[in-house]
């Protein structure tokens, strides 16, 4: 019993999947808005479309923003975000709560998907990309809505501010190396080449940067 | 990597994505097999993933929501599917009753958690299987790499053979027989000297391997003084082929010898002679 290409999940939970779905009723969404991420993922494994809608609205900006940071292209960032969420719906079991936070897992999936696209694009165009260039203002979508989940959104903003502060507190050269690796998808050797620095210097900067970031965030996030 | 644990530094580099692909693959392979390192890498990945939160907050276009839901298959069912659904419902009345129970709140999410845990456990087994396949794939990839290296070595050796054959045929080349001074041995060899290209080959067979700490060293005599051409080691079958260029400034030569020296070679000829090469100048003439 596999409809819409989704994995089979036997039991009464599947019955809900015969229901029509366009946009979840406000009441259905409201009942799940306060659920933590892990509970939403459990519900998604049970093919709860409303839970998926809540999770999508909760994190789509974050996923899109990270994708855009890597790809610097609105269309490609939307494609990558779509892939991340569709995979989340189709393969929710790949998230295992015991192994860590949902947000970490989602961000890792997003980064990996975007970097894969970046490398594929690099291979296609056979030129060095500039993923850390300033975003093209003209390409930025302007759609804006009120947060669906104000409390969660506020917590997320606070967490973002803490991490941004920790990253900004690093020496500039360490910060650049971490960003080139994480958002640029560059290896240490590629970073060394781009920055015209010895490989050992780059390795040291990444090591020190991660150490300081760990110390700065382990108590706060 | 196999058999060794990764360091915190490697875990960080792996998590931030800065490792070279070959090393990254080796780390991934190790993580598939080592729970302790896997925990360390996961902690590093959790830290690295926070970096993603520093991206400036942007909003995608409103059409993305529709695209995602459509691509996920969360759409209005087609008439065919409706008919299919009705058919299923008619055929499975009992399931429909249970479903109705579910819809009316008879079954709560809490009640499903046990099932879901079991499901997660099953899925974990599938993930482990997939991981095993990944390990096998990595092993095959490594084997392929080894084969490619071997093919490259064979190609290199073939190229060396061609060059040696060409040297044999060159009119500017002298070929001298090598005389073994060890009467109990069966070693035979040739010294090939291409004066035009300033290259020299030494080829010998049935050459006993030297014990640890010793090596063969070849010397050429010019003007009564010995100049080292370098050290060489025969393979397991006792075959040795050594190629080098004639040292700069060495224009005349008379004889050559092979001696046994300490490992790494000696700056002056000290060890016992095992081969003597006939008078090259005479051969050339």
Image (spheres, rainbow, N blue to C red):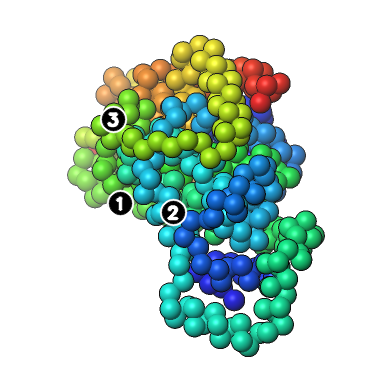
Pick the front one: B42 or B175 = B42
Q: Chain of mark 3?
A: A
Alpha-carbon neighbours of circle 2 within 10 Å: few (<14), some, or many (≥20)? many
According to the picture, the residue beneath numbered tag 1 turns out to be: B162
According to the picture, the residue beneath numbered tag 2 turns out to be: B68
Q: Position of residue B101 (x, y in %)?
A: 73, 71
Which of the two marks, 3 or 2, is nearer to us in this view? Answer: 2
Q: Residue at x 65, y 49 (%)?
A: A31
Residue B265 in sight: no
According to the picture, the residue beneath numbered tag 3 turns out to be: A136
Q: Position of residue A8 (x, y in %)?
A: 61, 70
Alpha-carbon neighbours of circle 1 within 10 Å: few (<14), some, or many (≥20)? few
Q: Position of residue B230 (x, y in %)?
A: 45, 29
Q: Is residue A28 left or right of residue A130?
A: right
Q: Residue at x 43, y 37 (%)?
A: A145
Pick the front one: B217 or A155 = A155
Pick the front one: B74 or A93 = B74
User: Rounded to the nearest whole Å, what is the CA distance between mark 3 and mark 1?
Assistant: 58 Å
Q: Position of residue B255 (x, y in %)?
A: 38, 31
Which of the two marks, 1 or 2, is nearer to us in this view? Answer: 2
- Secondary structure type for disc 2: helix
The quadrant in which residue A102 appears is top right
Residue A28 in sight: yes
């Amino acid at each position: 019993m596999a409809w819409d290409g989704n994995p089979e999940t036997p039991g009464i939970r599947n019955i809900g999947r015969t229901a029509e779905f366009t946009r979840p009723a406000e009441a259905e969404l409201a009942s799940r808005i306060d659920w933590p991420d892990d509970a939403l993922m459990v519900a998604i494994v049970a093919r709860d479309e409303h839970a998926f809608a809540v999770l999508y609205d909760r994190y789509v900006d974050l996923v899109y923003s990270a994708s855009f940071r890597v790809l610097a292209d609105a269309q490609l960032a939307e494609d990558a975000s779509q892939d991340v969420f569709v995979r989340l719906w189709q393969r929710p079991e790949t998230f295992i709560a015991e192994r860590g936070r949902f947000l970490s897992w989602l961000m890792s999936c997003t980064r990996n998907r975007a970097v894969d696209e970046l490398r594929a694009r690099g291979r296609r165009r056979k030129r060095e990309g500039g993923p850390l260039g300033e975003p093209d203002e003209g390409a930025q979508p302007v759609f804006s809505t009120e947060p669906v989940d104000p409390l969660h959104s506020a917590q997320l903003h606070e967490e973002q501010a803490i991490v941004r502060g920790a990253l900004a507190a690093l020496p500039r050269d360490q910060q650049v190396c971490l960003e080139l690796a994480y958002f640029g998808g560059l290896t240490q050797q590629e970073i060394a080449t781009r920055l015209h620095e010895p490989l050992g210097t780059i390795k040291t900067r990444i090591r020190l940067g991660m150490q300081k970031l760990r110390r700065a965030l382990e108590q706060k996030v | 990597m196999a058999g060794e644990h990764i360091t915190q530094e490697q875990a960080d580099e792996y998590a931030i994505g800065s490792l070279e692909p070959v090393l990254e693959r080796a780390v991934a392979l190790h993580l598939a097999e080592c729970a302790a390192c896997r925990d360390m890498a996961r902690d590093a990945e959790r830290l690295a993933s926070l970096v993603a939160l520093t991206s400036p907050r942007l909003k995608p276009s409103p059409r993305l929501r529709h695209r995602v839901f459509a691509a996920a298959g969360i759409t209005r069912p087609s008439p065919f599917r409706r008919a299919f659904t009705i058919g299923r419902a008619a055929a499975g009345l009992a399931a429909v009753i249970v479903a109705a129970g579910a819809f009316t709140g008879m079954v709560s999410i809490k009640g499903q958690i046990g099932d879901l845990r079991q499901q997660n456990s099953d899925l974990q087994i599938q993930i482990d299987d997939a991981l095993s396949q990944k390990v096998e794939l990595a092993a095959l990839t490594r084997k392929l790499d080894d084969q490619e290296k071997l093919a490259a070595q064979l190609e290199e050796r073939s190229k060396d053979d061609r060059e040696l054959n060409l040297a044999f045929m060159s009119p500017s080349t002298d070929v001298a027989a090598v005389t073994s001074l060890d009467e109990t041995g069966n070693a035979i060899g040739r010294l090939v000297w291409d004066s035009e290209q300033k290259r020299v080959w030494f080829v010998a067979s049935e050459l006993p391997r030297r014990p640890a700490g010793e090596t063969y060293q070849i010397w050429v005599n010019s003007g009564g003084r010995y100049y080292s051409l370098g050290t060489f080691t025969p393979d397991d079958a006792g075959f040795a082929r050594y190629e080098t260029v004639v040292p700069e400034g060495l224009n005349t030569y008379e004889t050559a010898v092979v001696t046994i020296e300490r490992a790494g070679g000696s700056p002056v000829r000290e060890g016992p002679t095992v081969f003597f090469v006939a008078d090259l100048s005479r051969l050339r003439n």
